[in-house]
Amino acid sequence: MAICNQCGERLPEGKSVCPECGAINTSEGVADVSRETADSESDRRPNLKGGSNLKGENEENVTDTARMRVKPEGSPDVIRIKVKRQDSTDGPSRWEEFDVPYRKGINVLTCLMDIQKNPVTAHGKKTTPVVWDSNCLEEVCGACSMIINGRVRQGCTALVDKLDTPITVAPMTKFPVVRDLMVDRSRIFEAFKKVHAWIDIDGTHDLGPGPRVAPEVQAARYDLSRCMACCCCMEACPQYGPVSQFIGPAALNQVRLFNEHPSGNLNKDVRLNAVMEPGGVTDCGNAQNCVKVCPKEIPLTDSIAYLYRETTWYSLLGWLKK
Ligand code: SF4
Ligand code: SF4
Ligand code: FES
């Protein structure tokens, strides 16, 4: 039985192309493919050491796969990645190490997908596929937050070429683990509900054109509106934790976002009252970690400063009205 030299998967009878990882196996290992030296489409065919030609072996697929396997000089053949595993929310955790084939431009999620296809540890032990959350793969949905080399960030934009190896990947620590790298991020949505992070409409009938919003206000609000509920800011915040009441910087930012909209401003009081309760804006210790890790570069500390001013005026006015 022939085995793929790249991923260890069984090769179909008489075939040299691995159906699992796409590597082209030769008698001397995996085919050495060089796109830089190719002048024409036909020249770009994999240069198999052993001189075999690929006709009759799904040539199209082989050529495409081969293009993906171009490896810059001096780069490693495999990437060692250490993943923190946990089978259930309350179960014990453990570390497992994997070797995944290096390709230029891959990110941490690509590595996890490779592991999913062939869940065998670097020490040759069969294991279960790693579980993680992702959706957009382009830093828009916020689902793939994880701790990579000790820093919370998105797995889909963590390029292997820019990371020290071995790469360590662990789930966020301030949210319940569902399994492996997947965590339950419900707390951020509960915090959004608490601060009324939406604009009410009073029916399905046509409300007519909304109020005009000055371009400067639109631009400022656009920066605040880019939050993707990834929870990185909450993970990095020293004041935020599983047992703390603090709602976190993302929800505070939403208060500013909606209070600065002419329609949202109609419910300004509701939001300001919410952030003046325990767990609100005064729980922020001004460590400024949140603004450093936010993948969308939202000016979170400006929003928190804005809320300090707004809540002070709101309290003063309330006291004068008495
Ligand atoms: S400024 Fe510091 S304490 Fe306040 S929300 Fe950001 S990280 Fe947390
Ligand atoms: S404010 Fe930034 S870090 Fe926090 S949840 Fe939104 S996008 Fe993520
Ligand atoms: S998969 Fe959507 S942000 Fe990473």
Image (cartoon, rainbow, N blue to C red):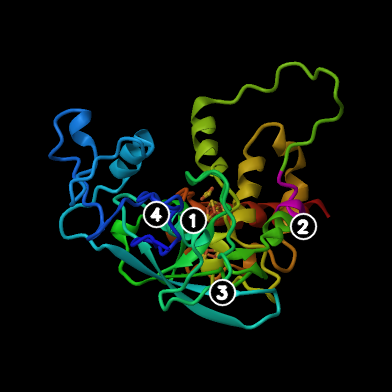
Distance, label 3 to label 1, CA atoms, is: 15 Å
Instruction: Indicate yes or no whether the magenta region holds residue 195.
Output: yes
Which amino acid type corresponds to the residue marked 2 in the rendered image? Trp
- CB of mark 4 within 8 Å of CB of mark 2? no
Q: Residue at x 48, y 67 (%)?
A: 147
In this rendering, position of residue 288 left or right of residue 54: right
Q: What separation in Å lies between label 3 and label 2 (alpha carbons)?
A: 53 Å
Asked if residue 291 shows in the view, the reply is: no
Nearest to the observer: residue 284 or residue 319: 284
Query: Dot 3: within a 10 Å radius of its alpha carbon, few (fewer than 14), some, or many (20 or more) residues?
Result: many
The residue where tag 1 is placed is 113
Q: Residue 148's x, y, as percent?
A: 44, 66
Vertical comparison of 118 with 42: above or below: below
Q: Which residues are magenta?
A: 192-197
Write the residue at 55% across / 81% down: 94
The three-letter amino acid code for the residue at tag 3 is Arg
Q: Earlier in the sequence, mark 4 or mark 2?
A: 4
Q: Secondary structure at mark 2?
A: helix
Residue 173, percent across and down?
A: 58, 73
Amino acid type of disc 1? Met
Helix, strand or loop at mark 1: helix
Q: Report the amino acid beneath label 4.
A: Asn
Q: CA distance from mark 4 to mark 3?
A: 19 Å
